[in-house]
Amino acid sequence: MEETAKKALVLDDEEVILNTCREILEETGLEIITSTSPAECIEIATAGGIDLFITDIMMPELNGVEVVRRIRKTNPRLTVIVITGYPSMDTAREFMKLGAYDYIPKPFTPEELRNAVSQAIGAKDPKKSMRETLVLEILDRTSDDPDFFDRLYMEGSEALKDYDISAEAKTAIATGDVKWIEENVGKLTEKQMMTMARRLESEIW
């Protein structure tokens, strides 16, 4: 018996973006549904039968955060990917709270979108990618915020209690475990590496 193709619903107020997403994602074997209407997407997604929802943030009728919030009330397990031309960590955190899987800034390459979608469709943990984004944010904050630097020295992983990341990730940050971070999150920037090295050399960790 032939397996039914998984369905992806894409919301954006620009037809050109929808057409681009369709062209890119049809190569993945997904059935693609596109719409410029937040209300229509809410109706489709809440009815079920959708495996992935991809949404823009800034739209004239209703922003992406509110669309996802409404969908979550009736379809809390739906995997969500956010695409936006106005990326910010505040917005990323907002979507993380709503259980978004990934956050892709425009302009994106076909490979970036296909990879994100492939990972999201097969993900056992739909929040994993967003939590990885938070790990990188924490490392940047460690580099830029001397007070936060000192809190990590004094409190260890307890200084990270407000961040929704795994206990393993908190321990890796608090102990300077570069190997774990690079294996589970990604390569560090030169700035992040210099900060980790400085802390280790100072025996602060």
Image (cartoon, rainbow, N blue to C red):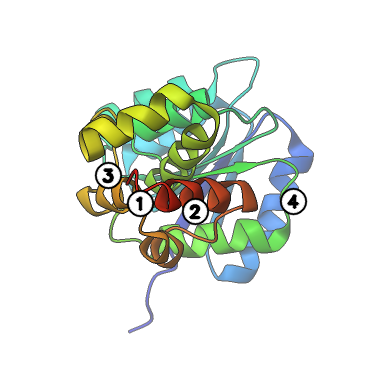
Nearest to viewer (mark 2 / mark 1):
2
Q: Is mark 2 in CB contact (under 8 Å) with mark 4?
A: no
In the picture, measured across the screen, residue 111 lies left or right of residue 64, that is: right
Q: Is mark 4 in CB contact (under 8 Å) with mark 1?
A: no
The residue wearing badge 2 is 197
Q: Nearer the viewer, residue 35 or 187?
A: 187
The secondary structure type at the circle numbered 4 is: helix
Q: CA distance from mark 4 to mark 1?
A: 26 Å
Nearest to viewer (mark 3 / mark 2):
2
Q: Earlier in the sequence, mark 3 or mark 2?
A: 3
Q: Position of residue 195 (x, y in %)?
A: 52, 45
Task: State the residue at coordinates (64%, 70%).
Answer: 27
Q: CA distance from mark 3 to mark 4?
A: 26 Å
Q: Earlier in the sequence, mark 3 or mark 4?
A: 4
The residue wearing badge 3 is 77
The secondary structure type at the circle numbered 3 is: loop
Give residue 128's mark. Answer: 1
**Mark 1: few/some/many CA within 10 Å (<14, 14-19, 20+):** some
